[in-house]
Image (cartoon, rainbow, N blue to C red):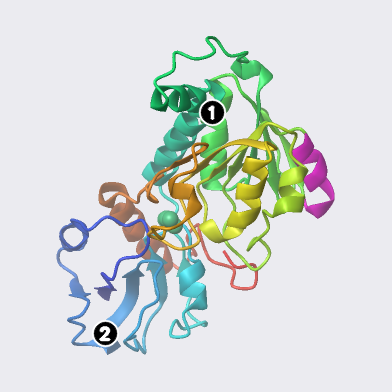
Amino acid sequence: MAIAYDSRLGIGAAPNEWEQEILNQFSGQKVQIWPDISNPEDVEYLILWNTIHDPWVDYPNLKAMLSLSAGVEQLLRDPNIPTDVPLIRMIDISLSVGMAEYVMGAVMRIHLGHHFYSEQKAKHEWGFGQLDLKLAKDRTIGIMGAGELGQASGEMLASAGFRIQYWSRSRKEFDYATSYAGDGELKTFLASTDILVVLVPLTADTTDMINVDFLKMLPKGASVINVARGRIIKDEDLLACLDDGHIEQVILDVFRKEPLPAEHAFWVHPRVFMTPHISSITRAETAVPTIRSHIKAFENGHVPKGLVDRTRGY
Ligand code: GLV
């Protein structure tokens, strides 16, 4: 059995020790690493990132493609990628824990009003003293997306005392959270959300989903955290809602164009806190063993968790 690793990195992936970790974990197997794919006909499993793979090598005997990224929208847009070979997206414990920790930090920043104090500090102002801050039990976090990352984040926030509600395509059961499902329940979900956390995949349905009409369904003073994909939000609508005071604060880790262009208004907006697509990173120490177990599953006739449904888009 031969494996190929297409090392062309996608968004969010750190330049790294991946090749070494893959060679270590698959020692004893034939591993070909891009661009040295000398025998594509031997390759049964291809490890790759969520990026456009151009030029593409044809692997005539491929059994599966294993993504190191949780999001696979670029792979689904890549005209080279075979559509008759199973594609598995990355579900990994350190990716989930890392995301939960980032979301917890982002929620806390908003919850504690740190953006106000940053604005004051920038103006050298002691300021307006104590804000009318709520306790976690009185703050509702609305998480869009109840997949692995959404659930890990919601569980951590619930353990800190926040009220949690999810919105997803289909209803789910949680003992610590309310589940809203489908277009029909979006309005109710948004109307009772204080801090919105965006953790849905980018699909045809979610592209530009967060526009002015959507944002106005949130209560005045709500805040938004986007850790999914930039193209889910219409930037100009978000900026308009920040400027008219409807949205209080925004934390963004993902952008329509990355790196964010120098002239973009987000760079200088006092109520926008940003990080450069690092909210959660795939870590080789856990992700490569996950890939190994995926390959083992395929070899034993099973389909591992994370099979991408191409019609659904994730
Ligand atoms: C990062 O954005 C990922 O999709 O894993």
Ligand 1 occupies quarter: bottom left
**Tag 2: amino acid:** Asp
**According to the image, label 2 marks what residue?**
42
Which of the image's four quarters has the C terminus? bottom right
How many numbered marks, from 0 up? 2
The x and y percentages for residue 54 are 35, 83
Taking the image as drawn, is residue 136 in sight? Answer: yes
Q: Residues within 10 Å of mark 1 (few under 14, many from 20)?
A: many
Mark 1 Cβ inside 8 Å of ligand 1: no
Which of the image's four quarters has the N terminus? bottom left
Q: Residues within 10 Å of mark 2 (few under 14, many from 20)?
A: some
Give the main secondary structure, helix, strand or loop, of the magenta stretch. helix
The x and y percentages for residue 89 are 46, 61
Q: Which residue is at a point 20% across and 63% down the rendered structure image?
A: 26
Residue 188 part of the magenta segment: yes
Q: Which mark is on residue 110?
A: 1
> In what element is the residue under mark 1?
helix
Q: CA distance from mark 2 to mark 1?
A: 52 Å
Identify the magenta region.
182-191
Q: Which residue is at a point 58% across and 48% down the rendered structure image?
A: 147
Query: Is residue 223 placed above or below 72 in the rendered structure?
Result: above
Question: Farthest residue in the right direction?
Answer: 184
> In what element is the residue under mark 2?
helix
The image quadrant that residue 235 belongs to is bottom right
The x and y percentages for residue 36 are 17, 81
The x and y percentages for residue 97 are 42, 38
